[in-house]
Amino acid sequence: MRVLLPLLLFVVLSGCGSPEPVAEPVAEKAIDPQPVAPKAEAQPAAAQPEQPKDNPAPDTAAPQQAPVNPPVNPQSAQPPLVEKPQQPVAPNRAPGKVPLLVSVRTKAGKKHVGELIERTDAGLMVYDIVLRDTVSITKDQVQAFVEGIDERTASSHVPFATYAAWKLTKLLRIGTVQGRIALASDKGIFINLGSAHGLSAGQSVTLQGKAEEITDPETGEQLAVYRAPVATLKILAVVNERLSKLSITASDTPVKIERGMTVACERGSTTIVVIPPQWKSEDPNLKTGDEALYLTEHILAELVRFGVPVISRDQVEQAQAELSQKTGKPVATLPAATVGQTLKAGVLVTGQILAKGQTGNVTLHVTDLATRQYVGILAGRIRRDKIREESKKAKKAADDIKKQVGSLPAEMARRKKIATQLIEAGVRVVLKLPNGTLVTYENKRLPDPDVGFPPVFAIQEVVFYDGNAHLSTLLAGFSLHRLSFWTTDSQRRYFDVFDQGIGVVSLYLQAPIEENHIRSIPRGVVHLHFGGDSQLSAKWITRNAPKHLYSLMPGGGVQARELPMLHRHLKPLFGKLILCPRQLDDGWTSVFPASIKRIEFHGSTFVRDEDFDTLRRGLGELQKSAYFTRQLTRLSICWFQQDEAVMEPLLESLLLSPMHRPRALTELALFEVKVRPRFVQRLRAAYPTVKVIGQ
């Protein structure tokens, strides 16, 4: 269950109604119209950054759990990966500050829980962590006001998982952050977001319009807030922790930018894995059920609605089963960090629930898996009898919003903007329409202005070339069917997007990649292809490739004798091997894994004359092997540039020899291979039971 579109899920932010109070609620009181700055909640074993003078706009993104009444002392609780808690460090940056919250109940019956952004004689401005949006409340609308809400009392006001996801957004500073225009004059455009929010020069900022409610069509419950994009801005300079200067870069219509208008900026994200917390009980006779699993599902649903990439519980269980089989250890004894690293997660959340009657005290540890640094503790309390209901409600809300998300104007505007940037830079972009039609844009040709992009589409495929691969980070959080890099150089920044929540089914890396250029393989990859110039070794692929591959092109860094090791590592799904010249050394068929029934030769790795000569020799050896005669079931020879005068003799010597025929062959694929129709007829006549495709 992963995030397909981060910003889209920023729009999809819904709240699950307040849970049954389990902590002593803070008494509500009449509003005191004296200005006050929000206080900062103390972080366990963490040095707090200096409190800024101005109230920042809140972070509206990211992920994860949070707490309520701590059952144990967070200062003394031990994290999973270090013996003593280190100073919390979020991925690649110091941890963000987590302010205390306020709760406002209006005379109209609405309740807003969140960060106090501004408090004046006229009223309040609050960032609602349930709606994920800033709301303004006038003094005469307020019926009751509560301030100073921390982990101990948060469960009286919002669901545990909602608070937790918001708190991790603040700690890790990832996802989408919402702010305001601080100044718009001849001196420039400034927003109240800066380095403290993880911003940097060059990032895009979206100017947003007025808020519109998205409600459940069945119950009328408010699910989210939608703000249409008005214009696109670019950060020219980050002035300080809470101030950045911008310039306007794109707007469909003339727009007047004024102080107080809402902006949103997408920051980098990291994939989070939540290991279901372990149950413990003070009463040996107390029965526990699936509460831990429901709590995990609820947390995951909240993270998804925050637009944060997560690892599903099914994927966690599959990884645990594979590791248990590989190591011979019971699942319960597997280190959580090992499971998280196997799944290529960036942040690990694990812990325990101490059952006390109908309540459960939760202690969760948050760890940065890349640095093995301890981020912090999330401690709180849940109602065991409410967990299942809250989990199902959260998942239903997320599903309801997903059904609407494809047609939301804001998300479509975002996709059009990204597609335009890519196409203008020469990237090949393929869009998929709701009816399944594919539309391709390449050679820097945008759609006709009178026609424009389709109103609703998904980005299906992206191909980067020399000079534009650095734009790959624009795809953070997207889920693509295919992603390709056809470049003559390789740089680490090209592949940073792999750590930013992108999902890919087929990944083609036709570049001279070195092992230090890629930290992880994107989530969801089942077809992994490295080019002939790849320098990735068999050991690197063994360590980093997903365990569920359907096909693999090992690339130029792998020798034929190393293929059996790769095959053993990638079982049981690995069924097709795509070979390049490096694997066609003399004697290659003698070490080729006999259980692989499908072979492909891709023309992209046999362009040079010496490589094509290697192919001729390799196919000659293949034809004379017992593997070819008895075991090969599918043969693919595709995407060759050579003409029919070269390809037809090659195929004839391989397939039409009366001495050696592949008796088990069921399918022959010849996509983008130049042969005449008469030759194809000869092949069909020689193999009447074989399916010949691609011609």
Image (tube, rainbow, N blue to C red):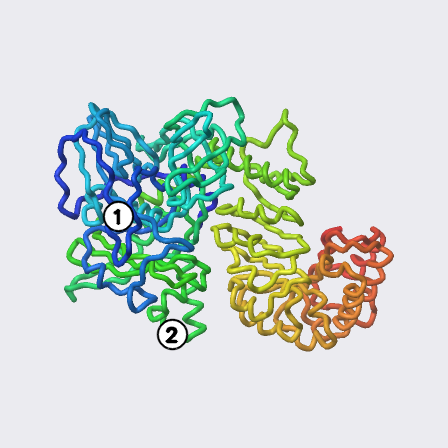
Q: Which mark is residue 160?
A: 1
In the image, 19 versus 491, the foreground residue is 491
Q: In the image, what residue occupies the spot 45% across and 30% down?
A: 189
Residue 216 place in picture, x, y as percent: 35, 33
- Residue 240 location in percent, x, y? 40, 42
- Residue 437 visible in the current orientation: yes
In this rendering, is residue 239 above or below 660? above
Is 449 located above or below residue 581 in the figure?
Answer: above
Residue type beneath disc 1: Phe
Residue 421: mark: none
Query: Which amino acid, mark 2?
Result: Lys
Q: Which residue is mark 2?
A: 329
Q: Residues within 10 Å of mark 2 (few under 14, many from 20)?
A: few
Q: Earlier in the sequence, mark 1 or mark 2?
A: 1
Please, what secondary structure does the residue beneath circle 2 have?
Answer: loop
Local crowd at mark 1 within 10 Å, few (<14), some, or many (≥20)?
Answer: many
Q: Judging from the image, what secondary structure is the residue with disc 1 in?
A: helix
